[in-house]
Amino acid sequence: MHHHEPQFSPAGDCFIEVELGNEMSFDLNVKIQALANSIREAQVDGVIELVPELASLLVSYDPDRLSYEDAVMEIKDIFEQQAEGVSEVPSRLFYVPVLYFDPWTTECVEEYRKTYPDKIPDPELLCEANGIADRAAFKRLHISTEYWVAALGFWPGLCSLMPLDPRARITAPKYNPPRGWTPRGTIGLGGGLSCIYPDRTPGGYQIFGRTPMPTWDKDQRLPAFKESAALFRAGDRVRFTPIDRDEYDFIEARVREGTYKHPAVDYQMFSVERYRDWLRDLDKE
């Protein structure tokens, strides 16, 4: 385990960027999430909001109540006091129903290709880039792992999902230039991360499926949004479950009438220690 010392830099008048590294790593992400939780618990006067990212943390603060230097000192102290490791974290598990290779993302890609005909359709590009035999094999691989909600950001409710099983790692380049729109509920993959588009937004990830399950709701209509307009919190896990078109329509109707219950397990702890042991055993195989 490298002991990453946090690097601090000002980001505008009232933001501090705290960086532990710039790679996509589970260990750094767990440390960032733990640091964010400790800062919250310390209730530092003048700290307004914390946005944990993959390996960094954006801290917004009130410069009238807290100077940049003092804020940095406080965060350094909190980081130093943290035990070397986090051994267990509460982690909800969400089962996200997905219609893979659905008509909506297919239409979206086709529309983009009218302007950029050289763009390989996303599912084929994902297979080629990762040496995957075909769409069916891609789907099997994508559903074969749990994903760790590493960060929420860029857009309200947009989550970055890191595969917990390294054998299920799939990487992909991003669109260049980005798409003008993406259907709400689209499942995308860019770099080594999957995501679920919370709303109709521009986008740059390769897309290949859609979920009828809402992950963001500004009106907080369904029970799952009682506490927050965003469904996921950092440290949750996601499992994609494939569905067919009938099931898609059935769920969509339940969502519309407001009776949909998000399939989730709310009583689990995620053991960071046992996860690391499991990874070590995988390496030996």
Image (cartoon, helix red, strand yellow):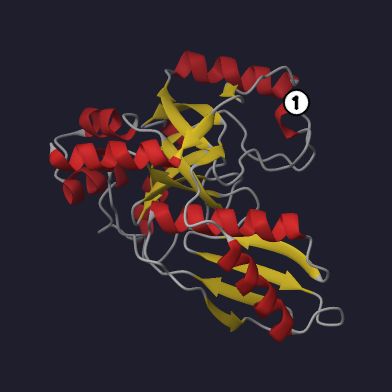
Observer-nearest of 134 and 177: 134
Against 148, residue 214 (above or below) is: above
List the residue tagged with mark 1: 223
* Quarter assignment of residue 2: bottom left
Left/right placement of residue 181 relative to residue 141 reads: right
Observer-nearest of 166 and 249: 166
Left/right placement of residue 259 relative to residue 20 reads: right
Numbered label tally: 1
Against 208, residue 58 (above or below) is: below
Observer-nearest of 155 and 256: 155
Amino acid, disc 1: Pro
Tell me where residue 191 appears, x and y as whole percent. Answer: 34, 57
Given the current orientation, which residue lies at the most extreme right position? 64
Left/right placement of residue 95 relative to residue 170 reads: right
Query: Which type of secondary structure does the marked residue at label 1 adopt?
Result: helix
Tell me where residue 247 appears, x and y as whole percent. Answer: 50, 15
Q: Residue at x 26, y 33 (%)?
A: 141
Q: Residue at x 14, y 40 (%)?
A: 284
Tell me where residue 211 appears, x and y as whole percent. Answer: 51, 31
